[in-house]
Image (tube, grey):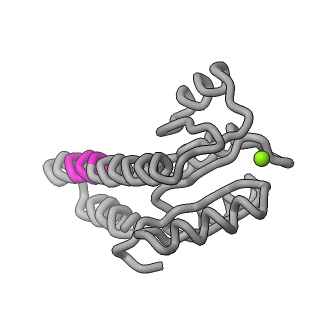
Amino acid sequence: MTETKINILIVDDEEQFLNSIKRRLEVREFNVITVNRGEKALEAARNNPIDVALVDLKMPGINGEETLKALKEEHEWMEVVILTGHGSVESAIECTKSGAYEYLQKPCKLDELLESLKNAYQKRVMNKKDIDEKKMKEILALSLGESSLRILRRLKEIDKDG
Ligand SMILES: [Mg+2]
């Protein structure tokens, strides 16, 4: 994955949809990883620097909502867009509560999807900035009273997070 592109993880149990959306996004400013199960999405997100995940709701194994929750829990600045063929007001509310950036319904126009993914990426950039600022403030506070070893540890954490 290169630095300049947006790294997208697409999770959907429909292989045909995965392939067609992957092709469409890859000719634009996206690096795309596709998986067909929630479990695989969690694994892929642990092993790759994902900015935004596009997640289907109805899948065998862990469903989209559980996938969303797990991704948000494990990756504090990642954004998740839901794209479902089985949307409902209830699930839209639930997903929003669980931290979904947006809730889209299939069929979704490509332009609309691209805009959502790009906006979600902007949010992800801000998330990272906010979290780094918070950590820097903590480090400053530490530097006034704590050992340099702890400060170094915190700095290392920021560095590791990229
Ligand atoms: Mg599905």
Residue 42: quadrant of the picture:
bottom right
Residue visible at 44% across and 70% down? Answer: 28
Horizontal side of residue 36 vs 152, given as left or right: right
Could you tell me residue 93's position as x and y percent? Answer: 58, 22
Q: Is residue 76 visible?
A: no
Residue visible at 23% across and 49% down? Answer: 133
Q: How many marks?
A: 0
Question: In this picture, which residue range is highlighted in magenta?
Answer: 130-137
Could you tell me residue 3's position as x and y percent? Answer: 37, 76
Q: Is residue 41 above or below residue 27?
A: above
Horizontal side of residue 115 vs 144, given as left or right: right
Residue 134 among magenta residues: yes
**Which is more toward the observer, 3 or 144?**
3
Q: Is residue 77 above or below residue 147?
A: above
Residue farthest along the right direction in this orientation: 60
Q: Is residue 37 visible?
A: yes
**Which is more toward the observer, 127 or 137?**
127
Could you tell me residue 87's position as x and y percent? Answer: 68, 30
Could you tell me residue 111's position as x and y percent? Answer: 45, 51
Horizontal side of residue 73 vs 51, given as left or right: right
Is the stretch drawn in magenta largely helix, strand or loop?
helix
Residue farthest along the bottom direction in this orientation: 2
Residue visible at 32% across and 54% down? Answer: 125
Residue visible at 29% across and 66% down? Answer: 152
Horizontal side of residue 81 vs 62, given as left or right: left
